Amino acid sequence: MSAGGQGTVITFCVAVPETERLDRFLAEQLSLSRTVAARLIAEKRVSAAGQPLRASAQLSRGTLVSVTFPAAAEPRRYAPAQRDLAFVFEDEHIAVLDKPAGLVVHPGPGHWDDSLVNVLVGRGTKLSEGSTTGRPGIVHRLDRDTSGLLLIAKTDLAHRRLARAIEQRRVERVYAALAWGHLANSPVTIEAPITRHPRERQRMTVLAGGRHAVTHAAVVARFAHVDLLRLRLGTGRTHQIRVHLAHVGHPVVGDREYAFGGSRRVTPSLRAAAEQLEALAPRQLLHAAELRLEHPVTGAPLALHSEWPADLLPALAEAAGDANLLAERNPLQYLRFFAPDE
């Protein structure tokens, strides 16, 4: 290993007969996240015999690999912000919080000083460095207007292990949603590639050539105009549940980006009730309700639940035609959303 103005160089020799893809091999050998390994390769910082290597390269025994890490930059500072947060689990390695709607997860344009990261800094929460600049501690995301359970890594070790567990589908993320219409079959698997919309760059869409995406959906309760769905992620693409449900003709109630008509899809003679439901939806009726995983350090099983949020309760009661739900402290449990766990 050597160091200089251009950064630190690590050189090692491949000792196995043949490696897997370079990005995976490098991440494993140097205890990096796949994102960091891929960035080093893309920036031509990984080479053999003086030639940059591709992410898909498979190396043979005896190959001498050099990795140049960029010179350490001054640590980025995040302005502290204050906001009440509810945590459902926390120790020295990880935290799981019940994210409120309206809170952006990480700093970005328009939200450089009021994101969840800023609030965690203001709280004094220790955060991992993260695999992407500007996202310390952030292992996965929730959309700004989606509430529910969110994993936070406090150490780099926990972050690497959580990222790997998510990649290997060993973290189960389950959402509750009200979706327009009724699924013809339940349970059903929605499998359709997702990519950024070619013209509207803030939106995602199903399009050939997009990233592989899988959502597992099951009907928990069937109401007059909507289904209450239990949705389990098979992959974790941006806006995945919202895009997939819209793609199969059952968009999330209250979704302003992917509703494709919303209540106007309902038969005109029944539309008044659907419009009333839509008027009670302050945002998309989508909530991250359940999280199951093994603790990345202790290995202990974690099964965490989050109930339907208060701001969406009037819409749920309207959809169900059951005013008693307004007084119900645990509406998802009342509707047997968590019944598969019993």
Image (cartoon, rainbow, N blue to C red):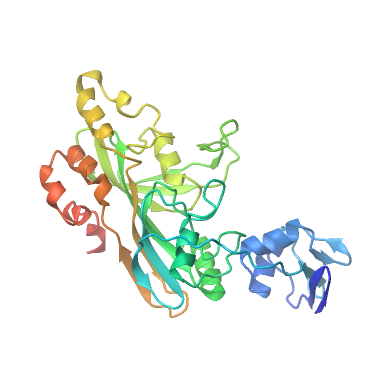
Which quadrant of the figure has residue 262? Answer: top left
Q: Indicate the position of residue 243 as horizontal and vertical percent values.
A: 45, 39
In this view of the protein, can residue 184 be seen by the observer? no
Q: Residue at x 56, y 32 (%)?
A: 200
Left or right: residue 122 versus residue 156 is left
Q: Indicate the position of residue 321 as horizontal and vertical percent values.
A: 14, 38
Left or right: residue 10 versus residue 324 is right
Q: Is residue 47 above or below residue 14?
A: above
In the rendered image, the residue lying farthest to the top is: 268
Left or right: residue 106 versus residue 341 is right
Which quadrant of the figure has residue 1? Answer: bottom right
Which quadrant of the figure has residue 312? Answer: top left
Q: Residue at x 72, y 70 (%)?
A: 72
Q: Of residues 294 and 262, which is closer to you in this image?
A: 262
Q: Is residue 7 above or below residue 235?
A: below
Q: Indicate the position of residue 305 as horizontal and vertical percent values.
A: 29, 62
In this view of the protein, can residue 28 be seen by the observer? yes
Where does the C terminus fall, quadrant-wise?
Answer: bottom left
Number of marks drawn: 0
In the rendered image, the residue lying farthest to the right is: 50
Q: Indicate the position of residue 196 as horizontal and vertical percent values.
A: 57, 39
Q: Residue at x 49, y 58 (%)?
A: 140
